[in-house]
Image (spheres, rainbow, N blue to C red):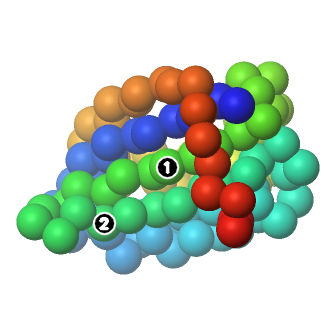
Amino acid sequence: MYGLLLKTRLKPGACDAFMDAMRVNAAASVRDEPGCLTFDVLRDRSDADLVWLYEVYVDEAAFEAHMRTPHFLASRPLVEPLIESQEAIEADLLALNPSR
């Protein structure tokens, strides 16, 4: 399995607008993409402008397919102006919570 952890620094005060778009993308990813197993969005408790995206796909090809979906493509022009910086950690998933 392919895992992705994105550290997303938002522009000050942009979290609400970011989440309006990200909720749609995250929900559609899990609902409509058989290869997307998890798409969680977390807000850092110590920094209101820091958001973490945790995504799990069956493989890297499923992630690449995710980036071509209508919901992903529709979210990009909405979220990109709100992001100050973003760092990605790619990982091979060793264990996944079976209750999900």
The answer to whether residue 68 shows anywhere in this view is: no
Q: Nearer the viewer, residue 28 or 82?
A: 28
Q: In this rendering, would 24 be left or right of 76? A: right
Q: Quadrant of the C terminus?
A: bottom right
| Closer to us: 51 or 60 | 60
- Horizontal and vertical percent position of residue 9: 24, 47
Badge 2 crowding class, 10 Å Cα cut-off, few under 14, some 14 to 19, many 20 or more, is some
- Secondary structure category for the residue under label 2: strand
Residue placed most toward the observer, 84 or 41? 41
Q: Position of residue 65 (x, y in %)?
A: 82, 32
For residue 34, above or below residue 46: above
Q: Is residue 4 above or below residue 69?
A: above
Residue 97 visible? The answer is yes
Kindly identify the residue that appears in the image at 73 percent across and 51 percent down.
Answer: 37
> How many labels, in total?
2
Where is residue 15 shown, x and y percent of the image? Answer: 32, 69
Q: Residue at x 53, y 60 (%)?
A: 40
Task: State the residue position of label 2.
Answer: 43
Tell me the kind of residue under disc 1.
Tyr
- Residue behind mark 1: 54
Residue 7 lies, in percent from the top left, at 32, 42
Marks 2 and 1, Cα distance to the nearest angstrom?
11 Å
Type of amino acid at the residue the image marks with label 2: Arg
